[in-house]
Image (tube, rainbow, N blue to C red):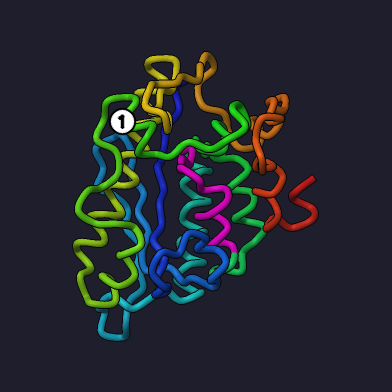
Amino acid sequence: MNRKYLAFDLETAKLLPEATSDLLSHRPLGICCAAAVTEDGAKPRLWYGRTELGEPAGSMSQEEVQRMVHELVVLVNDGFTLLTWNGLNFDFNVLAEESGLVEECSALALGHVDMMFHALCVLGHPVSLDKAAQGMGIEGKSTGIEGSEVPQLWAEGRHTEVLDYNTQDASATLELARICEDRGAMKWVTRKGPLAQMPLSKGWLTVGDARMLPEPDTSWMTQPLRREDFFRWFPTTGSS
């Protein structure tokens, strides 16, 4: 599928307790920065808040997040397909809250490709980006920094490190999407060790299309995730 992908990833700003597994339970989270990368060799697009002196701020203001959302809308209108890993449930969810532009963010989320959500709709369970990268034999997410460390690093003024980490995460998402489409399948390392595979004969589906896939058998799971729960943040008119 000949799409122009724009891989997007954001980093939150709020300092959280150690071993926090459910970030969204601590919202509002704030956004310290975000990155988007393309395959055309262009420099990564970076967004972050700025102080009156032009230096990186602790988090982006609502107005700054709104400008970012509007830029993403323009890029989509220019022919780019937004691409994320768990963007439906997290990145665009956070964007909607931080910008107040729920309608715009839900439309972006519905029309973009969220590879993790596609996998959930096919398999009945999510797959981690790192496990998929390992299965496809590529580098994956940044090493040396844990995502949970990002708010503290940003607060300490280590902005370049965080921006590099953010950009690498977006780049890994883009590389994984393309290599899976080129090979017609996504492979990942399972918890027990061997590789599993999900065919991608039609390439990656947008959130709107993946949502319409037949429900997989999840009777063997204790607490299966419901795909509709990923849309709880949508406005009523946009979730039907």
Give the residue at x 54% y 17%.
202
Residue 203 appears left or right of 183: right
In percent of width and height, residue 44 lies at 28, 49
| Vertical relation: 209 (above or below) 10 | above
Residue 35 appears left or right of 23: left
| Vertical relation: 1 (above or below) 226 | above
**Residue 61: which quarter of the image?**
bottom left
In percent of width and height, residue 212 lies at 71, 30
Residue 195 appears left or right of 200: left
Q: Looking at this rendering, what residue extends furthest in the bottom direction? A: 52
Give the residue at x 32% y 47%.
169
Amino acid under label 1?
A: Gln
**Residue 87 is a magenta residue:** yes
Q: Which residue is mark 1?
A: 134
Give the residue at x 24% y 57%.
145
In percent of width and height, residue 222 lies at 66, 40
| Vertical relation: 177 (above or below) 238 | above
Q: How many badges with numbers are in the image? A: 1
Query: Is label 1 in a helix, a strand or a loop?
Result: helix
For the C terminus, the quadrant is: top right
**Residue 184 is a magenta residue:** no
Give the residue at x 65% y 61%.
102
Depth order, front residue of 188/80? 188
Range drawn in magenta: 80-96
